[in-house]
Amino acid sequence: MKNVVFLLILLLFSCCSLKTERKVSEEITMARNDVDIKMVVLHHVNLIGIFTIVDVSCEEFERVFCDSMKKDTIVEPNEISLLKTYIDNLKRIDSLSINSIDTRCKLYLISPSDTTEYCVDSGGIYSDGVYYEISNELYDYIEKLEE
């Protein structure tokens, strides 16, 4: 009988605990999706057509490519929403498997309170210490800007 009571208490505790974790997780997701992006600025060169002797770091991108870099500003809400969807759906990569990023594009998502920067190369994206695998949709979107 004590074992049954113990199991019921344990089950009740774990159920409450899971609901709390899910609620917090949902709130974090909702807060991230509620960020009001007013503008996206892209600084970019051809993702695969430019070769350099060494990888171009995120910090050095604008300096290295100042003469050949294109700049696009996106303010149309549907385009911003599309880009935000592409970014929100990126798959995280284990940072231990990445040696460096060879930056060919920088995305700036600008809201009234913050600017988030993403550095892009032909295979990945880097932002705030996290690496992501570039999606085909985002890659194609950036490539179309080059045309």
Image (cartoon, rainbow, N blue to C red):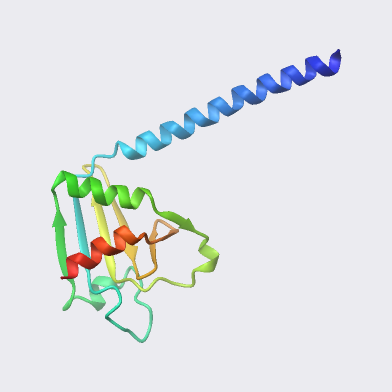
- Up/down of 80 relative to 11, above or below: below
Residue shown at the point (85%, 15%) measured from the top left: 2
Extreme residue toward the top, this view: 1
Where is the N terminus found, in terms of image quarters? top right
- Where residue 136 sits: x, y (%)? 34, 61
- Up/down of 9 relative to 119, above or below: above
**Residue in the foreground of this view, choosing between 131 and 49:** 49
- Where residue 126 sits: x, y (%)? 39, 61
- Where residue 60 sits: x, y (%)? 30, 73
Residue 145 falls left or right of residue 90? left
**Residue in the foreground of this view, choosing between 30 and 57:** 30
Residue 115 falls left or right of residue 131? left
The image quadrant that residue 49 belongs to is bottom left
- Up/down of 45 relative to 54, above or below: above
The image quadrant that residue 103 belongs to is bottom left
Residue 102 falls left or right of residue 46? right
Residue 92 falls left or right of residue 142? right
Extreme residue toward the bottom, this view: 53
The image quadrant that residue 33 belongs to is top left
Residue shown at the point (70%, 22%) measured from the top left: 11
**Residue in the foreground of this view, choosing between 84 and 128:** 84
- Where residue 8 sits: x, y (%)? 73, 17
